[in-house]
Image (cartoon, rainbow, N blue to C red):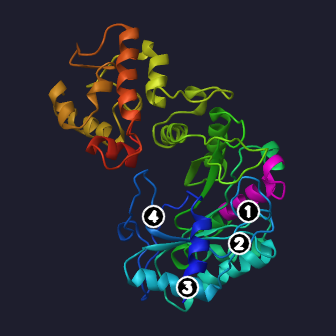
Amino acid sequence: MIDPEKLKILANGAKYDVSCSSSGSRRKNAGGLGNAAPAGICHSFTPDGRCVSLLKILMSNDCIYNCRYCVNRADNDIPRASATAEEICELTMAFYKRNYIEGLFLSSAVHGSPDSTMEEMVRAVKLLRNVYKFHGYIHLKGIPHADPALVREGAKYADRMSYNIELPSEKSLKLLAPQKTKQSLLLPMRALTEYRKESAEERKKTHILPAGQTTQLIVGATDESDGKILHLAQSLYDRVGLRRVYYSGYVPVVHDGLLPERPAGALREHRLYQADWLLRFYGFTVDELLSDEENLPTEFDPKCAWALKNLHLFPVEINRCPAEMLLRVPGIGMRSAKRILEARRYTALQYGDLVRMRVVLKRAKHFITCNGKFYGAEKPTAVRQSLALQSEAENAEQLSLFSSPETALTSLTGEL
C-alpha cells in the first residue's frame, strides 16, 4: 500500500484541478468491480459545490515544467513524491471497497519526460481494467507533448480524458507556461475527437471515452476578459465537441512577480459557469451576452443582465410564447420550461400554477404575463432595482449547497 506521507503529497498536489466531476459514462460492468453508469456514480459535494467522490491524485508532483501559476512547478521548494502504477491501483481498489470513492481522477506533473509520464499513467489504468477488473469511473489527464499513440491507448481504458488549456491565449501561455503551446493542447484534443468518431461503430466493444473530453481554464491569472474566455469555450464546444469547460478562479498558491497577488474571487468564476450553462443549454451565443473585451456583470446573473438589455422583447405571454423565448425568461429554468410547455397544452396557466412549477417568480414576474395579467414592476429602473436587491441577497450565499433548497438546486443545476 502507498505510504501515507506520499499519499498526502500527491493528493495535495492534485487539489487545484477542478475538472473532476464524473458524469456521462455508460461503461458496462463485464464481471468485475464497480459501475461507471450515471446512476452508479454517487457524488459528494463540498460547501462550494465541488465534486469530491473521486480519488483525485497525481502519479507524481515532481515536474520538469515551470508553469508560473502551478504549485508543482519545477523551481517551487515543496516535498516531492511519485507513485507507481501498482500503488495507484491498490489504493483505488482499497478506497472503492471501503465506499470512500466511486472512481479515479488520475493526473500527473511531467516527471522525466512527457512520454514516460503518460506511459506510466496508461499502465495504471490498463492494470485497473485488465488485472484488477475495475469497471468504475476513470478520468485520465493528458500530458502535453506526449506520443499520440500513448494517448490513444489511454483513451481505450478511460471514461473521460482532459487536457487543461489553463490560460486563454497563446500570449499568456508564453508568459506563464513557456513549455506548453496552444498546439500541444489542442492537437491531442482534436485527435481524440477524431478517434472517437472513427471508433463509433465499435463503441460498444471498445468504449472510447464514453464520457467525452473536458478542459480547465484559469480565470484571473492573466488579463483576458470574460468575453475572450467564453469565446474560447464556445469554440471548443463547437470544434472539439468538449463535454465541459471548467473555470477555476485564480488562487495565488505561489509567489511570482508575473502573477497577481489577489485571487480572482468566487463570484467571477460563478458568473462564468452561469454563462457557460446558457451557451450549452439555453440557446445563447457569447455575442448576445457580452462583447469580446467585456467582463460579465457581477450585480446580475448573465440571463438577467441580457434581459435587462432587451426589455423591448418583454413581457412574453406564458401561455403562447415559443420554447426558445421561454428559456430566456429570468427565473425559468430548463425543467420548469418543460413543465410549462407540457401543461399549457391542456389548460391556460395561471400565476399560481407557476408557483407550483417552481418558477422563480420574484425574477420572472417582471418579464411575463399570465392570461394577459402582469404582476411585475412597470418601470425599467424599478425592475433593475428589484433584481439588484435579489442578486445582492443571493450573492452572499450563492455557492453554498447547504442553505435554502432553492439556492442549492440552482447551484447544482445552473438553472437561471
Report, in whole angstroms, how far the alpha carbon at label 4 lies from the one at label 1. 27 Å
Q: Which of disc 2 and disc 4 is earlier in sequence?
A: 4
Labelled pair 4, 2 in contact (Cβ < 8 Å): no
* Looking at the image, residue 243 lies above or below residue 286: below
Callout 2 amino acid:
Val
Locate the N terminus and report the quarter of the image it occupies. Answer: bottom right
The residue at which mark 2 appears reads as 151
Q: Regarding mark 1 in the picture, which secondary structure is present there?
A: helix
Image coordinates for residue 113, horizontal then vertical, percent: 81, 74
398 or 135, which lies in front? 398
What residue is drawn where x is 43% and y is 50%? Answer: 48
Report, in whole angstroms, how far the alpha carbon at label 4 lies from the one at label 3. 19 Å
Residue 52 is labelled as 4
Residue 188 is labelled as 1
Question: Callout 4 environment at 10 Å: few (<14), some (14 to 19), or many (20+)?
Answer: many
Whether residue 350 is visible: no
* Looking at the image, residue 94 lies above or below residue 67: below
Q: Which of disc 3 and disc 4 is earlier in sequence?
A: 4
The residue at which mark 3 appears reads as 89
